[in-house]
Structure formats: C-alpha cells, structure tokens
C-alpha cells in the first residue's frame, strides 16, 4: 500500500513539474542564454506580470510604488511627484494659478473672504475683504460643513469659465450678485520697498519662472527712487530654478566673475560667469539668510560672498549643493532627480552630508537649537580642511551651508521658540480677521502710510481680545511676549487692510536682521566686503 501511494505521488509530481517546465521552457532558455541587468531586468519583470500573472494587477500603481521605493534610497532631494502634488508644485514655480483670487477662512460654516489677491478676477469684479461667498452658480456653500479643500476645488480650476457668485457684505448688510470669469491669479515671487531715503529692501520668496522679470523691475524701481544700498532678503527661500538664481547674481557682479560651477554625473564641470548686464555693480549689498535658505538662494549668497561683493548676515543656511531636474512620467506625474552638484566660485561645495537616514538629514536643521549653534556663532561646525579664500582674503568654508559674515543669534529657549512659531503662524492671522470683522468701518479711511507710521491704537484691547481668543481655541500660549504679539497683530492687520508690502514694513520695524544690517551700514569704520 505504501509503495502504491509513493508511486502515485511521484507520478503527480512529475506531471506538475512537466507542466511547469513545459510551459516556461522558452522563458527559462532565454534567461539562461543572456544575463539581464538594471533596466532590462525590470522591463522583463513587468512583461512577466502583464503576460503571465494569474490575477489582474494594476501595473501602473505597482510601478508608482516601485519608483517611490527606489527614490527613497537615493539622495534626500530626489523625489516622486504624484498627480495630486503636481498641480500645486507647478503653480509655485509658474508664478500663477487659475481661480477667482481670494484667500478665505471658514467661519460659522461660511466662506469669509480674508484678502482679495492683487491682479485676480475678484479684485477686478469688486469683491472686498469681509465679504461672505454664499453661492457659486446656484450651489450653496454655507451650512454644509464643507472643507476648505472642497471650497478651493469649487473656486479653482484650469478652465476659465464664467461663475455667478452671490455675496453678502456685512458692513453694508446687503447681498450682491457678481458675474466673473475664473482667470489667472499672479503669485509674485518678489516683494520690495524703500526702507529709508537711501536703503532699498528686496525679498525673493522663491526662484520661479517670473522671478527674473520681477527682480529686474523691482531693482529698477528702487534705483529710480534713490536707493544707494540694498538689503536682499533670502530668508526662508527654499530655492527654485537655478537659471533664475544665476540671473539675480549676475545683476551684482562684474563681467567675467564666476557665479557657479556645475558638475555633471560624468564628472564634467562647467562654470557660469557674469555678463555685462549687471545693473547694480557698486553700491553695498547686504544678503540676509537663515537655516531655511536653500539651494538657489545659497547659489546667490555663495556667489556674492565668494566674489567679495556682499555682506552675508544671519545664520548658517540649509546646506543644499545638489541640482535637480524634473522629468515627466506621463501626464501630471514626474520625478525630480539629482543630476549634478554645484560649487561656489571659490570651489566649495556647501552640501551637508546625507549618508545617514533622510529623517536625520532634515532634522539637523531643527537640531541647531539643541547644539547651541543658533545662540552662538562659535558652535557652528567648521571643517578646517574645507576652508577657501576669496580674492580679498576672506576665509569661507564648505561642507554644510553658507556661513554668514555677520552672525545673528536666535533665542534657543524651546518654550520661547515655540511661542514665537505660534505668533508667526496663521493663529494670529485668524484672530485678527475675526476681530477686524467686527470693527472694519473704523479703518476704512486709513492710508497705508498712516498705518505703517503709527503705533497700534488701544493695545490693551487687542491683548485682552487675544487672550480671550487663545482661551477659546485652547491654544498653548501662557506667558507669550506681549510686545511681539502686538507687533504680529499690527502686521496681520496691515496685511488684511492693505497688503504684503505693508505687512513687511511693520514687521521690519522690530526685525533684528534688518536692524543689524542698517546698523552696519552706518558704521563708517566698516570696509567693503
């Protein structure tokens, strides 16, 4: 009996193996005849899935997962761009989006217009801050517990279609009907104004498609207004197009001076030099950076520092010396791959090491609180072997960001830092809107100049109202800096009443980066960098 069972099992197994080998012998013969490596191996695998796998499978989803897994093992600045993120990233870099041009809060389940964005359809149609958007094309937006994302999807879109809006305006206690066409809303990347009779301020938010044109226009306007010295603010600038950064640096350098060197994946290095187009070659320039200044903003700061063209003020920058190229993966999908390294004119790489995990790499910026670097310049990690010398003999360092010439310390008490973060967040913006909405008529005749040039009236009222708001929100602010809170309240009032320039003007009155630059300009003993 046992022998019969054994023979039966051998026969069945032989049949199974014969079926397996018989149906796949051609495949196996191909595999043994030629080795497959890299891309060919992946292609062959997906071919097997498509042609032979027993169940239906979403190979597109599988490919996306595989791409994400592969990129996770590369450098920290290569990443996959999903269809959901693609449009948002394109808006940031293209400098505009398609919509009606308002920012809003949901208050009592109703769309409250906080700001009307300059140059958009809503501004042209006459919509005002404080208006409530009740309906869009007979579709009621209030009382439905809609998310802010759902409202955005209703008001934004790639098609310039006509929209019928029903608006309620509390200051007039009236309803209005507006017909407007969804259109292009600018997202400026440059902000500027004249700090005083001689000093101009120019902030580059990011290096996008329109940055060079905006920058040149702003620089020309400031010069026409009498600017003799410039503060170029690159704080919190995450980077962007390398070409835009090169054009900005070119404006400050003499023909032939090196701007940046790019080294390809094949080890070939190409240096870009300044042209004769520079329009601001001689007056002093002060560049502001912090730990969130990265990539293209570091290219500009490094070029001006290495050519002894500008004083660099602030804190050590992020430390990103890698160049990415965006490559499409079909429609509305892409990858950004690191394709090169860049070097400043003296030959230094400012890329931080990234051999550890990506989480550790990005956490290093926040750890500068605990290491003491933000409180004391002598805590900056300096590698003596990575020292370089500028034409005028200044020592600069590679290995991890741009180290400023003039260091600005920061409060490293974590509780104080957390409170400052909250005071700079949307928390104050939301409070200001709610409070301003009850007294909007009081400010209707004020000019921007009057607001910027005067103190906040009745500060006790605003602080008391703010305390009440914090209690209502359950916000973790107990012993916050009252002076800082009043400054932020006044700045957000300026934003909502007038615009971003006025907000910046108010903030800069107590901005220690700006104040230190102005102080340095007045010191007659200081030589040019």
Image (tube, rainbow, N blue to C red):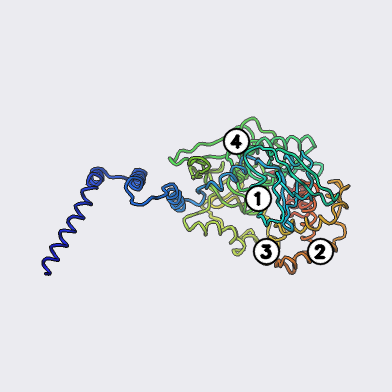
Frontmost of labels 4 and 1 is: 1
Residue that sits furthest to the top in the current view: 276
Alpha carbon separation for disc pair 1 and 3:
21 Å
Residue under label 4: 257
Point out the frontmost of discs 3 and 4. Answer: 3
Q: Residues within 10 Å of mark 4 (few under 14, many from 20)?
A: some
Q: Is residue 334 left or right of residue 4?
A: right
Q: Considering the numbered disc 4 on the image, is that residue within a helix, a strand or a loop?
A: loop
Upstream in sequence: badge 4 or badge 1: 4
Q: Which mark is residue 289?
A: 1
- Which x, y percent locates residue 453? 85, 50
Q: Earlier in the sequence, mark 3 or mark 2?
A: 3
Q: Seen in the image, is 482 located left or right of residue 407?
A: right
Per the image, the residue denoted by label 3 is: 418
Q: CA distance from mark 3 to mark 2?
A: 21 Å
Number of numbered callouts drawn: 4
Q: Earlier in the sequence, mark 4 or mark 2?
A: 4
What percent of the width, then of the height, locates residue 78? 50, 48
Assign a secondary structure to mark 3.
helix
Secondary element under disc 2, as helix, strand or loop, is: helix
What is the x, y in percent for residue 311?
67, 46
Badge 1 vs badge 2, beta-carbon distance below 8 Å: no
Indicate the quadrant containing the C terminus: top left, top right, bottom left or bottom right: top right
Mark 3 or mark 4, which has the lower sequence index?
4
């Amino acid at each position: 009996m046992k022998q019969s069972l054994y023979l039966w099992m051998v026969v069945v197994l032989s049949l199974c193996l014969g079926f397996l080998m018989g149906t796949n012998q051609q495949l196996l013969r191909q595999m043994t005849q030629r080795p497959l490596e890299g891309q060919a191996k992946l292609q062959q695998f997906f071919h097997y899935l498509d042609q032979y796998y027993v169940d239906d499978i979403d190979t597109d989803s599988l490919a996306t997962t595989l791409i994400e897994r592969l990129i996770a093992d590369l450098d920290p600045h290569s990443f996959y761009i999903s269809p959901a993120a693609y449009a948002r990233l394109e808006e940031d870099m293209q400098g505009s989006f398609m919509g009606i041009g308002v920012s809003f809060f949901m208050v009592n389940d109703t769309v409250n217009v906080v700001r009307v964005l300059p140059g958009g359809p809503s501004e042209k149609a006459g919509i005002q801050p404080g208006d409530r958007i009740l309906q869009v094309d007979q579709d009621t937006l209030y009382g439905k517990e809609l998310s802010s994302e759902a409202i955005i999807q209703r008001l934004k879109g790639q098609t310039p279609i006509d929209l019928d809006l029903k608006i309620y305006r509390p200051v007039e206690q009236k309803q209005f009907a507006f017909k407007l066409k969804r259109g292009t809303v600018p997202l400026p990347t440059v902000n500027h104004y004249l700090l005083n009779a001689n000093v101009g301020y120019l902030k580059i938010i990011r290096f996008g498609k329109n940055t060079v044109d905006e920058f040149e226009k702003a620089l020309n306007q400031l010069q026409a207004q009498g600017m003799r010295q410039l503060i170029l603010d690159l704080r919190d600038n995450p980077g962007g197009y390398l070409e835009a950064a090169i054009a900005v640096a070119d404006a400050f350098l003499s023909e032939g001076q090196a701007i940046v060197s790019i080294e390809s994946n094949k080890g070939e290095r190409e240096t870009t030099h300044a042209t004769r187009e520079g329009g601001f070659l001689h007056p002093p320039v002060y560049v502001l950076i912090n730990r969130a200044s990265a990539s293209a903003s570091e290219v500009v700061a490094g070029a001006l520092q290495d050519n002894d063209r500008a004083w660099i003020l602030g804190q050590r920058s992020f430390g990103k010396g890698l160049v990415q190229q965006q490559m499409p993966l079909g429609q509305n999908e892409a990858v950004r791959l690191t394709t090169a390294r860049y070097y400043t004119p003296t030959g230094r790489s400012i890329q931080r090491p990234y051999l550890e995990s990506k989480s550790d790499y990005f956490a290093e910026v926040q750890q500068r609180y605990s290491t003491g670097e933000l409180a004391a310049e002598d805590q900056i990690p300096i590698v003596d072997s990575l020292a370089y010398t500028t034409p005028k003999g200044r020592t600069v360092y590679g290995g991890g960001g741009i180290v400023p010439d003039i260091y600005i310390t920061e409060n490293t008490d974590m509780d104080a830092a957390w409170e400052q973060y909250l005071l700079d967040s949307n928390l104050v913006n939301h409070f200001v809107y709610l409070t301003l909405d009850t007294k909007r008529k009081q400010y209707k005749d004020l000019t921007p100049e009057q607001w910027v040039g005067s103190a906040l009236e009745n500060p006790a009222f605003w602080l008391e109202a703010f305390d009440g708001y914090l209690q209502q929100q359950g916000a973790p602010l107990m012993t916050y800096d009252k002076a800082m809170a009043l400054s932020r309240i006044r700045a957000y009032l300026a934003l909502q009443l007038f615009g971003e320039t006025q907000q910046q003007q108010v903030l800069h009155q107590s901005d220690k980066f700006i104040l230190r630059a102005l102080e340095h300009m007045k010191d007659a003993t200081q030589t040019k960098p």
